[in-house]
Amino acid sequence: MTIQVGEVGRKRERVQYVPVFRVQLVREGSTKTCNKELSSPSAAADIMQDYIGDTDREIFVVAMLDTKNKVIGINTVAVGSLNSTIVHPREVLKPAILANAAGIIVGHNHPSGDLTPSLEDMSVTERLGEACKIVGINLLDHVIIGDGQYLSFKERGFL
């Protein structure tokens, strides 16, 4: 909205109003998880499996952790197709920043059951690691789940 203001004999100036936002995190529900610190990739994989389940398309999620690696929240970042999901670091970090997370574990499923990371999986993890360093949030692992098994980027030395 633009309003013309000014005085007689003076040039009119345009005053522009900009929106003022309040940013907040909204709880949508809850999911079961352990109430202890995540001390292993298998514990992270269990949380991812409980949350994602056996879906027919890729789902990318972020688990947000406190300073003792306890899960303080989980967020679905993206829902994709049978074999791909578009993920951007800003969408992963947005809920983590709002939740004041000290660290994150990201994960997604491979509905095919083949846990081999794609080149895009590797690229997203690398970009996410760089973004996490900038904002001061630790990227602890990236877990891929499928057919009751998991692959941990940390265990494989990819992270």
Image: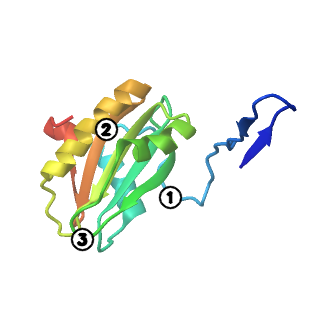
Which of discs 3 and 1 lies nearer the camera? The answer is 3
Name the kind of residue labelled 1 in the image.
Lys
Image spot of residue 65 (x, y percent): 47, 38
> Which picture quadrant has residue 124?
top left
Residue farthest to the bottom, as pictured: 56
Task: Mark 3 or mark 2: name the one nearer the start of the chain.
Answer: 3
Q: Secondary structure at mark 1?
A: loop
Q: Which mark is residue 128?
A: 2
Q: Report how far apart the C-alphas of labels 3 and 1 lie in the structure.
A: 26 Å
Lower position in the chain sequence, tag 3 or tag 1: 1
Quadrant containing the C terminus in the rendered view: top left
Do residues under tags 1 and 2 come within 8 Å of each other at their CB atoms?
Answer: no
Q: Secondary structure at mark 3?
A: loop
Instruction: Give the amino acid type for the residue marked by disc 3 in the picture.
Output: Leu
Residue ID for mark 1: 32
Residue 82: image tag: 3
The residue at 48%/51% (across/down) is 74
Residue at the extreme right? 8
Q: Are marks 3 and 2 in contact (CB under 8 Å)?
A: no
Image quadrant in which you'd find residue 80: bottom left
Q: Residue at x 12, y 55 (%)?
A: 116
